[in-house]
Image (cartoon, rainbow, N blue to C red):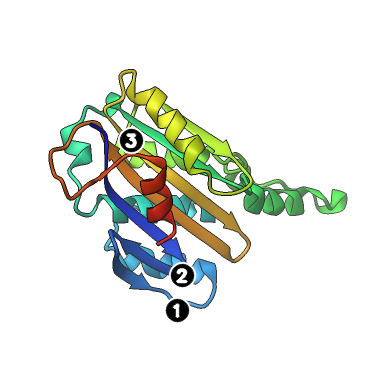
Amino acid sequence: MTHITSYAHIKHQRLSANGTLLFDGGSSGSLPGFLTDAYKALGMSYPKYHKMDALCKLGMLCMEAALKESELLTTYPADKIAIVLSNAASSLDTDRAHQASIQDKANYFPSPAVFVYTLPNIVIGEIAIKYKITGENAFFVSERFDAGLLLNYLEALFHGETQAAVCGWVEADGDAAEAFIFLVEKSNKNSNFKPLNQEAITELYNQ
């Protein structure tokens, strides 16, 4: 049976995992301030984080929180772990920064450091690199969080070679930021874990 074994949220500059508040960024002010303070609060040590765009930082923070009490990475082969993420704005936040760097023809200077993040699936790449995950991956853009879409894709993956998955929603649009990541494992006897279904995914997302 397939279960949701861990989950994490970033909402209103608050980071939580499995219903427990890990960091309240109310005093951080801006989104960049929150992303820096939450990184420190989690005790992360990953210098590349500071070069990422907001979307990737949100995904990285939420992933780190979801993994805090999880053995997913040591239980399953790296090539049997999938990553499936989604959002509504794609990479619009970074697209705006890139557009700003090229719109003035008299001062045309596109930044390679910005351009590299002008695809939403880069957040998947960053997570895969840090946590050494080499399984299937997909990024969906939908108008709103769609538990049914994610479930259908996960079910297809688990009918194949996938044994575990990182899944969820990572959105960055200006100072509006939200992330929800949940971990799924193909077999687990712990009855405290939620069976994977649309109702469970929606319930956890709405917490």
Closer to the N terminus: mark 3 or mark 2?
2
As drawn, the label of residue 26 is: 1
Element marked by disc 2: loop
- Foreground tag (3 vs 2): 3
- Mark 3 = which residue? 165
Q: Amino acid at mark 1?
A: Gly
Q: Quadrant of residue 44?
A: bottom left
Q: Position of residue 73 (x, y in %)?
A: 22, 38
Q: Residue at x 13, y 44 (%)?
A: 190
Image quadrant occupied by the N terminus = top left
Residue 199 appears in the figure: yes
Q: Residues within 10 Å of mark 2 (few under 14, many from 20)?
A: many
Q: Residue at x 74, y 52 (%)?
A: 101
Please, is residue 149 above or below residue 193 in the view? above
Seen as rendered, the residue at the extreme bottom is 27
178 relative to 136 in the view: left or right? right
As drawn, the label of residue 39 is: none
Q: CA distance from mark 1 to mark 2?
A: 6 Å
User: Marks 1 and 2: CB-CB under 8 Å?
Assistant: yes
Q: Amino acid at mark 2?
A: Gln
Q: Position of residue 39 (x, y in %)?
A: 36, 63
Q: Amino acid at mark 3?
A: Ala
Residue 49 appears in the figure: no
Q: Nearer the viewer, residue 61 or 151?
A: 151
Q: Residue at x 43, y 54 (%)?
A: 205
Q: Nearer the viewer, residue 127 or 162?
A: 162
- Mark 2 = which residue? 13
Image quadrant occupied by the C terminus = bottom left
Q: CA distance from mark 3 to mark 2?
A: 25 Å
57 relative to 94 in the view: left or right? left
Q: Position of residue 97 (x, y in %)?
A: 68, 54
Closer to the N terminus: mark 1 or mark 2?
2
